[in-house]
Structures are given as C-alpha cells and as structure tokens.
Amino acid sequence: MTQYFNEMYQGGKVRPPYARLEDWMKAMPAELRTLKQAEAEDLFRRIGITFAVYGEGGDPDRLIPFDMFPRVFTGAEWARLEKGIKQRARALNAFLVDVYQRGEIVRAGRVPSRLVYQNEAYEKAVAGIKPPKGVYSHIVGIDIVRTGPDEFFVLEDNCRTPSGVSYMLENREIMMRMFPDLFRENRIEPVDTYPEILRRTLASVAPEKCTGEPTVVLLTPGHFNSAYYEHSFLADLMGVELVEGADLFVQGEFVWMRTTEGPKKVDVIYRRIDDAFIDPLCFRPDSMLGVPGLMDVYRSGGVSICSAPGAGVADDKAVYTFVPEMVRFYLGEEPILQNVPTWQCGKADDLRYVLDNLSELVVKEVHGSGGYGMLVGPKSSKDQVESFRAKILADPGNYIAQPTLALSTTPTFVAEGVAPRHVDLRPYCLVGERIELVPGGLTRVALKEGSLVVNSSQGGGVKDTWVLAE
Amino acid sequence: MLSRTADNLFWIARYMERAETAARFLEVGSRIALLPSAGGYRNEWDSLLQASGNADAFARKYGDPVQRNIESFLFFDRDNPSSVASCITTARENGRIVRTALTAQVWDALNTAFQELRQLERTSRSELELSRLTEWTMRHAAMVRGAIEATLLRNDGWDFLNLGYHLERADNTARLMDVKYYVLLPKVEFVGSGLDNYQWTTLLRAMSAHRAFHWAYGGEVTAAKIAHFLILNPQCPRSLITCVEEISIHLNRLARAYGATSEAQARAQDMLAALEATKVEDIFDEGLHEFLSRFIREVAGLGSLVHETYLSGDMR
C-alpha cells in the first residue's frame, strides 16, 4: 500500500496552513454544505462558465465539478514553487530561441537533434526569427504534483495556449462570495490581478514597428469552441477585443481589425488557436479560423503572436525529459523543480525496463493529452496491461513511461462527508518583459476514490487554490 | 467597436423583431381565415405566405397551405429561417457571442426565451393554442426589448440594436400591410365593403394597434385612415415614418459619436423627408402595393448601406 502525502493531516495532526479550515469544516452542518454546493453550481451555471481543459475535448456545455474545500500552500512553500516555475519558464523560452536560431544545445549534444528538428511541432516557417524580447511562450502552464512536504515534480509543460485560468479566477470569486468569513480569518494572496498582468505582459512584447500604446486582441476559434467562455471572459477582464479570424485582415505590412469606425491596426495577438490554423497561406490551407498573410506580417515584425508559432516544440513529452538539462545549459543553475523520472520507449534499454515493469508504471503517448490513451499500470487489469504492451511494441517511439506517482491528497467534499482525494496544480507563469506569477493556480482533483487521474474528462473537478501571506 | 460585435447586436434586434412579426402574421392569418370569403380558406393563407416572402419555401416542403402546416412553418420549423423558433434561437446565439457587450438582464431575457422555446417544442401540439403561441412570442420579445431599454449603456452598441429593430420593423410593417393587397387583389369589388373593413381591422389587431387607432382617429375604419396611421402617423410606434425617424436618429447619433457622417445617414434623412411630404392620397394614387414594394426596396438599400458603412469593417 503506497503512502500518500495528505496535505492537511500529518501524523494525526493538522498542518498549520489548514488549521482554520478544520474549524470551518467541523462547524459546517451537512445541510448547509449541500445548500452551499447547490449555490456554487447555480453561480457557475448562471455565469455560463463551461469549458474543457486544453485538448480534453468533450461536451462544450459541460460544467466541471467544483469542490468547495480549498487547497492551501504556505507562503514559504509557494516561494520555492515560484522560483522553480519561473526558472523553468525562462529555460523553456531560452530553448525555443536557441532551436530556431543556432541550435547550440543540439550542437553541444545535450538534446538529440532528432527530437527537435524532426518534431512535428517544430515550425520551419519561423526558423531564424527572434520574437520581441526573445519570448516564444508568454503563458507557460506547468503541471505540478506533490508527493511529500518538500517534494514537487513537474508532470508536463504547456507552452502553447494552456487553458483553465478562468477557473482559477472564478473559483476564487465564488469562494469569496460564499464564504467571506474564510477570507477575513485567513490572509490569502489575491489572484485577481492576473488579467491585468496578462495584458501588461502582452503589451510588453509589441513589435518594434509599433509606436505608441499597442492594440492587443484575443483571437478565438469562435463561439463553438469549448473554451469560448474563457476567451470572452479574459478579453473582457483585460479590456481587449475578442476577435475571430474573419475580423482580421492583412493589408500592407500590418494586420487590421474590422471596426465600426473602419480598420484599426493590431499589434499583439493573443491567439487561442493552434499553429496549424493561424494562417492558411503558411500552414493548413483549409483553415477557416486564421488570417491569410498573418505569418508574413509576423516575420517582418508588423505584429506579435502570443504564444509565438513554433512554441510547441518545447512541450512534448519526449522533449520534457531534457528540461532539467536546459536549465543547466542556458541558466547555469540547478533545476529547483524535479522532473518525474521518464523512460523513453524509443530507447532499447528503456523499452526493456518498461516492458518488464509494465504493471508498476504509467505509460503515455508522447503527444497525448487529457488522460486519454494512457495506461496506469497498478490500476489496470492484466488484460489491459497486455493489450497496452502490444500497442507499445507496435510503435515504441510513441510512448514514454513514468513511475506511478503517489500524488498528494487534500480533503474534499464527497457524498459521505469529507475524504482525501488526489490533486495536481497548474500555475500560469507570464513571460514578457518581466516574468510574473500570480500566487495561485488551478488545482484539479480526482473525485473518484483512489483515482490518480485529475483530468475533467475522466471525472476530475477543480478547487480554489490558496497561497497564505507570510 | 468590432464590426462583428456591432453586427451581432444588430442581428439580435432584427431576429427578435422578426420573431414577433412571424407571430403577428400567424395572428392575422388565423383571424382572416375565420371569415367566410369568396377566395376561400386556402387563398388567405396563401397570400400570407406570399407577403412574408416565404411562399416558395413553404410549397416545396409542405405543398398546399393548410393552417396546421402554416403554423408549424411559421412557428416551429427550423428549416424556415424566419420562423419564431429559428429567429429566437439565432438571436440568442448572437447574444451568446457578444455576452460581454450585453447586460445580465438582456442575456437573461434572451436565454429565458430560448429555454422556454425548447419546452414548447417538447409540448404536444394539441395542447398549444395558436393564440398562446403568439402571446408567448410577443411577451418574450417585449422582455428583451425592455431589458435593452432599461439596462443597456446608451453607447454605439445600443444604436446598432436600435437600427436593427427599426430597419426590421419598417420592413415588417410594410409586409404586413401588403398582406391586405394579396388578400384583396382578386376581388376589386370588395373594396369598401364590410369584408374589407374587417380585414383592415384584423391588421390593426395584429399590430396591437386597434385601440390606439380608435384613440387617434375615432369613427369609422377606412382604408385611408389606416394607411395614414400605419404609414404616415409619427404617433404610431410601428408606422413606417416612426421607424425611419428612429433609424435616422440612431444614424445621427453614430455619426456624432464617430465624428464622421455617412451615406446611410443622408439616405435615411431623405427617406424621412419624403415620407413627411407624402399625403395618404399620394399613396393610393401610386397604388398601395406599389408604394409598399418601393418602400421595402428602399429599406433594404438602407440596410445594405448600414452594413457597408459599419458592419463590414472594410477599407473605405
């Protein structure tokens, strides 16, 4: 039986950051809890917050279950996480600048050439381009799990367009509305500065050709997209226009948006559509979502695109293995956040180990996401393990394996009362002229007893995440 | 403001007004059909479809104009883009796209109409009286309109909503009056008869203007009075002149806000001036149908100008 780190109770005692929450929990009768839970759900439905986390697919009008029991970090714990996250975001961006320029890390033999240049996320179209301020990934979502008091591991990096931040903001909003006393009793760092910092970050990477106050827009695939709510929510809070591809056009050396007062020049595009769709003349010719000619303007410095096209090469699961190496290579520092040990099934030695220990490991597709197409060895039947073995053998390079992590648990409201459930954390690091991180993030919780999969498509929910002021 | 946002607001208003008109058409039709007439039952409904501009689409799908099918077509049919169900769904979808440009109350009114519509669609048709459907539509149209007037910031977005409402209403009032032409055309000898008056009165009822008409004119219902009321009287909220005046007001507001005059603005002023100079005799001299057809074309032209000027966002 694996021992899980319980973030609230250690050796029968309450850990200090949760002290006041224990009183709160004990003082809440079951009826009130049910009432509050219904109220929270009603609030979510009323504001229309429905979405799916990056790449998970599923019903666009689905509501993700909200758990009212907050997840808490001390100021000291957060300070260390913050350093580690910012360090990683810096290294990932340095890597991106490097692999689209001289490729020093490849020449030095620290990252295999094949993983970079033959990666399907490597965009030849942007080779040689250095985006403003040398930033490719402006919003880095880093998925982190905890296994002990001081043990944090990075599960994966999201350098393209990580979603879910609207949940971080709405979870807090709803908790503050429903339990104002909790916020008087605990000194909780605010997260509602995120939209303003995001806007500032985007404005800070305006192209050189932009003089004066830059015009920022958020480019969405449209209202049929499952994350449309988040797009309109962020655009509204930042006070920028929410545009679709058809609202933009290229003329001369700039990108323009169609407004009631005529065309208006656009300087920075925070895009929430994939590389493949942003410009039909450069990428997929059948894309209806993008802007024809956008890449030409981008290449000639007429507009900034966030995240920059090509950022995806830093965040696949095979490149992930090398992030600690990037930290050492570019920053000359030791990584503060650890990677989960990972075996590449594409390597003969690793493959042998993986096949010998399949029932102990978690196996994932290199490009997979959303908890689909993965094997959780200890939670799978013999048949499932064997059929997965066949899949790995058919295409070993497509898989990586990791030990089954003992994800920490936090108390969670369940039908029977309060019980420990496994959680992870996705903070959103903003990279522009400066690197900033609001104290908090999205905590996802596996609501099924014993489950280690927190993805909303697999029965996961979300929680408010607190960082206590020191 | 983004042109698409303005476009979405414009179409929320147009579709809500259009839904109301579809319901009014149904009301006119069912009342006219209650009356025994020379043309027979079939003829009235047919003229209704003609005037709504949907006769071909209906014939392709249903064949003969039977009342029950017409009710389905004008209220429930999603294949008919002008049915009440289609209009309310499209208006709400437009609203969903620009949620942040609307107040919670406006969104709530749009969304409630849509949610209740879905319930109506699940209700057995035998339980749904036609009058209930038309009243339901008008109630929800009024709630959306009320929420807009009571809660929305009076900025350019409000102007685009109002342009949508009044362009659509101008078109619809003209079309509703045109029904009369189609109903009466085959039998010129009916003009001035009891039947003729009954039909005119029905039209007034469908416009919720029956009482208002009597307040304004009194005495006997005549074609001239009604034409004056629905075309030239600026007191009547649905009259053509009121609609054009409102369009002109909102185009002027936009021109002021943006600091740029527009061709649409000039065109609306011309139309208003022409209506102000028109006497009801002029209309009958030209022929009511001819006058209305010309007016419908002019309104459509004005709509295109608004689109070119503000909603397309092209280089000018």
Image: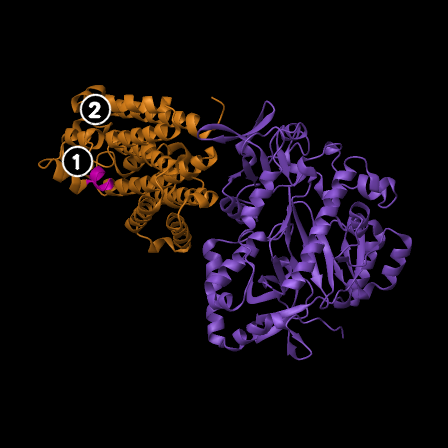
Chain colours: A purple, B orange
Residue A106, position as x, y percentages in the image: 85, 41
Q: Is residue B183 left or right of residue A402?
A: left
Q: Quadrant of the C terminus of chain A?
A: bottom right
Residue range in magenta is B202-209
Q: Residue at x 76, y 73 (%)?
A: A2
In which image quadrant can residue A285 be found? top right
Write down the chain letter for disc 2: B
| Closer to the eye: label 2 or 1 | 2
Between A46 and B69, the one lying in front of the other is A46
Q: Quadrant of residue B175?
A: top left
> Does the magenta run of residues contain A81?
no
Q: Nearer the viewer, residue A258 or A348?
A: A258
Which residue does the numbered mark 1 point to in the structure image?
A: B195
Residue A309 visible at all = no
Residue B287, percent from left and from top: 23, 22
Q: Is residue A287 left or right of residue B247?
A: right
Q: Is residue A166 above or below residue B208?
A: below
- Between the C-alphas of marks 2 and 1, the distance is 31 Å
Give residue A49's mark.
none
Q: Residue drawn 83% across and 59% down?
A: A389
Residue B276 — which label?
2
Q: Is residue B113 above or below residue A16?
A: above
Instruction: Name the residue at the right extreme.
Output: A349
| Residue B21 visible, this angle | yes
Residue positioned most to the left: B219
- Asked whether A457 or B130 is in front, the reply is A457
The tag earlier along the polypeptide, 2 or 1, is 1
